[in-house]
Image: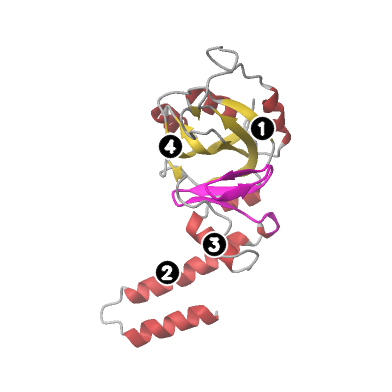
């Protein structure tokens, strides 16, 4: 399967770090400043990779208990792949683990990472566990997870395409997501065209303030005046 072409607007978003993007979103006042991002328990496992940008494809899993029939594992179909392909690319798999013991096993490892990339996914997020970290890192496939597990335990899919909640963030199928070393956030799609310019403008003002703060002999009055200019801009 050929890689999904990245639309220019999403490519531009990928050049922005998470903090600068959050600052830009805040200027539009479309949500409270304590909303729209993960709470910190779900970590970026490969922070050296570029920012991850794509549309959410959502599933729910369980995995702490064996099958009730006494079988050694659940048998998974591949029908959910069709749902993944129905969402515009690039795609990010978002997995909510609703097990009684969340993260007991890993749904995503080297095999699933390669399959997901073939399905046009550019990364994956879960409040559960992942594994095979060195192999997935070599693949260049971003993972955001709350835990790491040596085993896949009894992980199996129990919901596809439903809204999920991962680390305090509600995510719906098709939501536009951005993730980097600082965390994962939901990007308002109607602001997509404006965000790169706003982020660049805010970053330029921050660089000016930082340069002033690093100037030998700078006074408190100068710093206070610069802060006030930034607030009124």
Tell me the element at label 4.
strand
Q: How is the image coloured?
A: secondary structure
Can you say whether 233 is above or below 131 in the image? below
CB under 8 Å between callouts 4 and 3?
no
Q: Label 3 to label 1, Cα distance in Å?
A: 28 Å
- Callout 2 secondary element: helix
Q: Could you say where residue 139 lies in the image, as x and y percent from the top left?
A: 47, 30
Gap between marks 4 and 3 measured at Cα: 24 Å
Quarter occupied by the N terminus: top right
- Magenta segment range? 163-190
The residues tagged by marks 4 and 1 sit, at their Cα atoms, a distance apart of 21 Å
- Residue closer to the observer: 136 or 206: 136
Per the rendering, the mark at residue 34 is 3
Q: Which residue is mark 4?
A: 147
Which residue has dot 1 on it? 159
Q: Are marks 4 and 2 in contact (CB under 8 Å)?
A: no
Cα distance between the residues tagged 3 and 2: 25 Å
Q: Is disc 4 in contact with disc 1, using a CB cutoff of under 8 Å?
A: no
Residue 221 to residue 164: above or below? below
* Lower position in the chain sequence, tag 4 or tag 3: 3
């Amino acid at each position: 399967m050929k890689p999904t072409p990245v639309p220019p607007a999403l490519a531009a978003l990928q050049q922005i770090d998470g903090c600068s993007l959050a600052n830009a979103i805040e200027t539009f006042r479309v949500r409270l400043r304590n909303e729209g991002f993960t709470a910190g328990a779900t970590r970026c496992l490969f922070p050296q990779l570029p920012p991850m940008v794509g549309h959410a494809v959502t599933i729910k899993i369980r995995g702490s208990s064996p099958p009730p029939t006494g079988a050694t594992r659940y048998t998974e179909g591949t029908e959910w792949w069709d749902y993944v392909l129905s969402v515009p690319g690039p795609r990010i798999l978002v997995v909510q683990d609703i097990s009684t013991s969340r993260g007991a096993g890993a749904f995503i490892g080297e095999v699933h990472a390669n399959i997901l990339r073939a399905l046009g996914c550019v990364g994956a997020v879960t409040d559960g566990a992942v594994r095979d970290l060195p192999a997935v890192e070599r693949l260049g496939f971003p993972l955001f997870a709350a835990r790491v597990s040596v085993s896949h335990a009894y992980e199996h899919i129990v919901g596809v395409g439903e809204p999920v909640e991962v680390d305090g963030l509600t995510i719906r199928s098709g939501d536009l997501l951005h993730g980097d070393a600082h965390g994962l956030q939901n990007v308002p799609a109607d602001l997509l065209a404006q965000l790169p310019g706003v982020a660049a403008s805010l970053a330029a003002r921050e660089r000016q303030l930082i340069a002033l703060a690093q100037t030998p002999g700078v006074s408190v009055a100068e710093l206070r005046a610069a802060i006030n200019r930034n607030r009124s801009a």
